[in-house]
Image: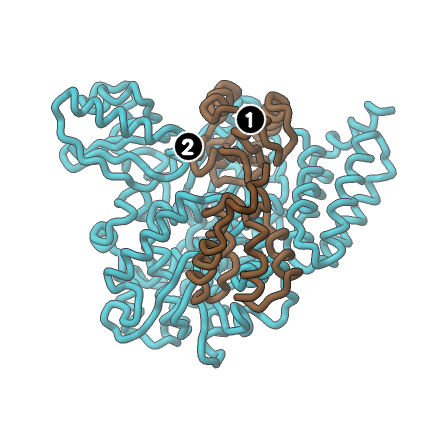
Amino acid sequence: MKVYVPMDSAAKALGAEDVVRALRDAAAQQGVTLDIVRNGSRGMIWLEPLVEVEIDGVRHGFGPAAPDDAAAILDNSSAKALGPVEDLDWMKRQTRLTFARVGVIDPLSMDDYRAHGGLAGLRRALAMTGQDIVDQVKTSGLRGRGGAGFPTGIKWQTVHDAGGPQKYIVCNADEGDSGTFADRMIMEGDPFTLIEGMAIAGIGVGATRGYVYLRSEYPDAIRVMNAAVEIARKAGVLGADVLGSGRAYDMEIRVGAGAYVCGEETSLLNSLEGKRGVVRAKPPLPALEGFLGRPTVVNNVISLATVPVIFERGAQHYADFGTGRSRGTATLQIAGNVARGGLFETAFGISLGEVVNDLGGGSASGRPVKAVQVGGPLGAYMPVSSFDAPLGYEEMDKAGGLIGHAGLVVFDDSADMLGMARFAMEFCAVESCGKCTPCRIGAVRGVETIDRIRRGDGAAIPILTDLCETMKDGSLCALGGLTPMPVMSALTHFPDDFATQKEAAE
Amino acid sequence: MALPDTAIDGAEIDRIIDAHMHLEGPLLPLLHALQHAFGFVPAQAMGPITAALNITRAELHGVISFYHDFRDKPAGRHVLKVCRAEACQAVGGTALAEATLAKLGLDWHGTTANGAVTIEPVYCLGLCACAPAVMVDDRVVGRVDTARMDAILAEAGA
């Protein structure tokens, strides 16, 4: 009997290991031979651990599974039966391109990977010139999924055109934004797709070496990625002769050390070089002077992991999804106080309200939704009145926010928005690299100024606004430059949370 | 509770440094390996590292002190990381963290008197759809409430 239990860390965090033990025990008692596959997560985190049992070739889901459900799951009498997983509304409504294999295959089986379309993109790319590869990425319309939204093909072109004895592909897997876990899920659930994407990037721009800078807070992802790189080397996907093409590309996994700012590409490069993770001034662009001063592609995990499907199915196929200048799919991460949280991949353009209320089912607490922070700790707190806004790079910008890494954190009406604004400043103060004054000093002053407002000092509100202007315009990178976004959106959209404090004090 | 100097094996330090010298940008992997071996980055390693990498002691101190992960003295037997980030806050993470600190009678980065548990803040474990989340050593736990936290602390011997 073939059974799937995710090894994704969200499933583990909700008891998947205990469920596996219980399934083994129950199988022994029932005299059933079990073949347990540890897959990635399907993304329905509210159903994790989601056990799947293959019945007549169809995978039936049971979840959220607890250890004492094991016997009933195996003899198909469980009240937690969900029916065929592919028929669930959450699955049917998605356009799974980047995440097509996540939750489906054994993440560390190269045979599974190949059987589900893996390596087809790399094979196609190996038959092309570097310029053709770069042109395909341009045609796809792929933009940086880490948040900045810079066109990936343009970045690749710059590195392609740059000279020098050594170029690099660096994957930014320092997914520190709260409310985001797509990078983690794909690294744990389909690591070969990231490796394949990086290999295509390397072949395209002429880089023979690559690094994944992976945050230390993700021990499971580190284990899976390290194992996957070993397997890929043995399979000839990485090495001196990629898939027998005579072209070289190899890579390794590097572990971060707990600094949020290292998600910023230039401080990431400094960290990778073994320095303090301090932001570098641009120019020079990392594309020209990146890792060790050499031309370097720095892309987010999801950007690189999307490259294989673009080459497998065609750039135009990918570009046909989406809205405006946001082409392809967004890998939405629905989190926080939400009834149904998880990973949902769909074409850009879906509205914020549809995601929160329809897909997410509103708040987990049952109380009214008050705000949604979109795009991580540097994203805006969007009020319910902006729920019509479509999720796209320009569209979110127009609505006064940013899409960032497409994480959405839902808050119910018990949220204290002044407290959230204060936390944004506090977080910036803790994580500032210290290089530029607006961020280093501004964040500390921001906490103090918000405390003044909390104590009822209304005169501190214009000071906070002015401080935010200075941080926004004067900071070297997005940490100091965007911390004003959660702060000012909280102040603008939820003035009562700032005013009542004042009145209460008077 | 710093270990006596004799407990630090200088040959082991040299071996770890040598094993990383072929890497491009060897310092972070090297520091991680030292911390893995000794539980912290021993002061005795400073001289050999600066010599091997041709950097100053100030530069090395700058790197070690920049990153939250590296410690200059041992932690408790278990490290409990409690997520303080927004998604966990949205479902009661702040109250959980405060209650846990109060129960242990510690502030962040503190270690229980019996040396069992060091408690640290962490900003996101990527478990934002099953928050509040914590990590005990390398083991993640989601939807942590008071009861589950009590069980974690009991198991860790706090």
For the C terminus of chain A, the quadrant is top right
Dot 2 and dot 1 residues touching (CB under 8 Å)? no
Subunit of label 1: B
Image side of residue B142 versus residue A176, left or right:
left
Residue labelled with disc 2:
A13
Residue labelled with disc 1:
B114
Image side of residue A441 versus residue A233, left or right:
right
Mark 2 secondary-structure assignment: helix
Image side of residue A116 versus residue A440, left or right:
left
| Residue B149 is at least partly visible in this image | yes
Q: What amino acid is found at the position of numbered circle 2 in the picture?
A: Ala
Instruction: Please report the residue visible at 24 percent of the width from the left and 67 percent of the height from the top.
Output: A243
Q: What amino acid is found at the position of numbered circle 1 in the picture?
A: Asn
Instruction: Please report the residue visible at 56 percent of the width from the left and 66 percent of the height from the top.
Output: B51
Q: Nearer the viewer, residue A472 or A475?
A: A475
Chain coloured brown in the rendered structure: B
